[in-house]
Amino acid sequence: MPQVIFLPHNEICPEGAVIQAEVGDNLIEVALKNHIEIEHACEMSCACTTCHVIVREGFDSLAESDELEDDLLDKAWGLEPDSRLSCQVEVGDEDLVIEIPKYTINQVSEAKI
């Protein structure tokens, strides 16, 4: 059973987290079920970039991104070669180390300030 390791993020996951996942689990759903509130303005329909994450380890175990995800990622803040939209990632058979970027581009954020 692979682990998903979320690196610390000041607001979303200050202490980081290590979560057991099943092969085929959706990454953002794993996070949300474990109280890691990754933003998802489009309700996980691959229509925005608010759930952008960087896969620091285990990237090669994931299925390749499709053209729609790649087009959206081009608009994400802090894009890196190992960036993915967490709503489009299915956990593979290797552990993943995930970094949640400091910022997101969301013109309709409902977060309280």
Image (spheres, grey):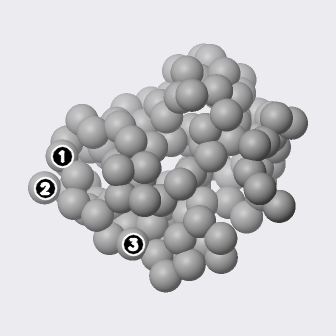
Q: Could you tell which of marks 2 and 1 lies nearer the N-terminus?
A: 2
Is residue 72 visible to us here?
Answer: yes
Q: Could you tell which of marks 3 and 1 lies nearer the N-terminus?
A: 3
User: Quadrant where the C terminus lies?
Assistant: bottom right
| Residue type for callout 2 | Met
Q: Which residue is mark 1?
A: 22
Q: Could you tell which of marks 2 and 3 lies nearer the N-terminus?
A: 2
Q: Looking at the image, is 27 positioned above or below residue 36?
A: above
**Helix, strand or loop for disc 2:** loop
Residue 28: give x, y in percent of width and height.
45, 43
Q: Which residue is mark 2?
A: 1
Q: What is the residue that sits farthest to the bottom in this orientation?
A: 15
Local crowd at mark 1 within 10 Å, few (<14), some, or many (≥20)? some
Q: How many marks?
A: 3
**Helix, strand or loop for disc 3:** strand
Nearer the observer, 38 or 59: 38
Residue in the image at 53% along x and 71% along y: 13
Q: CA distance from mark 3 to mark 1?
A: 16 Å
Q: Which residue is mark 3?
A: 17
Q: What is the residue that sits farthest to the top in this orientation?
A: 67
Residue 108: give x, y in percent of width and height.
82, 35
Q: Is residue 94 left or right of residue 87?
A: left
User: Quadrant where the N terminus lies?
Assistant: bottom left
Residue 32: give x, y in percent of width and height.
43, 49
Residue in the image at 55% along x and 21% along y: 45
Residue 97: give x, y in percent of width and height.
42, 64
Local crowd at mark 3 within 10 Å, few (<14), some, or many (≥20)? some
| Residue type for callout 3 | Ala
Given contact means CB atoms under 8 Å apart, are the residues at marks 2 and 1 in contact? yes
